[in-house]
Amino acid sequence: AAVNTGAYGVAEGGSAELSGKQQSIAEGSVSMIAHYFKSGVSHQQMTNLFPATFAIPFPRAFNKFLEMMSWADLDIVGLFANIGCYVRTGYFYISLLGMTLIPLAVVGLVILAFVLSAARLKLAKAEK
């Protein structure tokens, strides 16, 4: 009896299981797309800094393009923009605060993970 397959070669009512080679190709394609996406976002983040870095007038079309692509700008410093009521304001101090808190937060998370894993090991040894 002939099996009726759909457009993707999957038997009707069956599952879409990929062979090892097909799965490897699919994973490679996803990895490649993720790589290009990360590279594009990184490039756009640097390009978004041009007006603040270079004191030259850019064409209107370029400025509009930067406005459209502002979603790629992960402005961590902007999160601290309203802190001016409590500390000195100015771009230097705000950026210093933002750039200092991020590494401190990462170090804090690493220490927390270490302490939790040590406590879990101690608890596992106590149970034995």
Image (cartoon, helix red, strand yellow):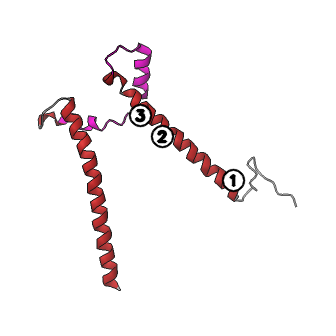
Q: Residue 46 placed where, x, y %?
A: 39, 31
Which residue type does callout 2 highlight? Lys
Cα–Cα gap, marks 3 and 1: 32 Å
Q: Is residue 117 left or right of residue 15?
A: left
- Res. 38 mark: 2
Name the element at disc 3. Answer: helix
Disc 3 + disc 1, Cβ < 8 Å: no
Which residue type does callout 3 highlight? Ala
Q: Is residue 25 left or right of residue 65?
A: right
Q: Residue at x 41, y 27 (%)?
A: 47
Mark 2 or mark 1, earlier in chain: 1
- Res. 72 mark: 3
Magenta segment: 54-82
Is 57 colored magenta in this rendering?
Answer: yes
Furthest residue in direction bottom, as rendered:
128
Cα–Cα gap, marks 2 and 1: 24 Å
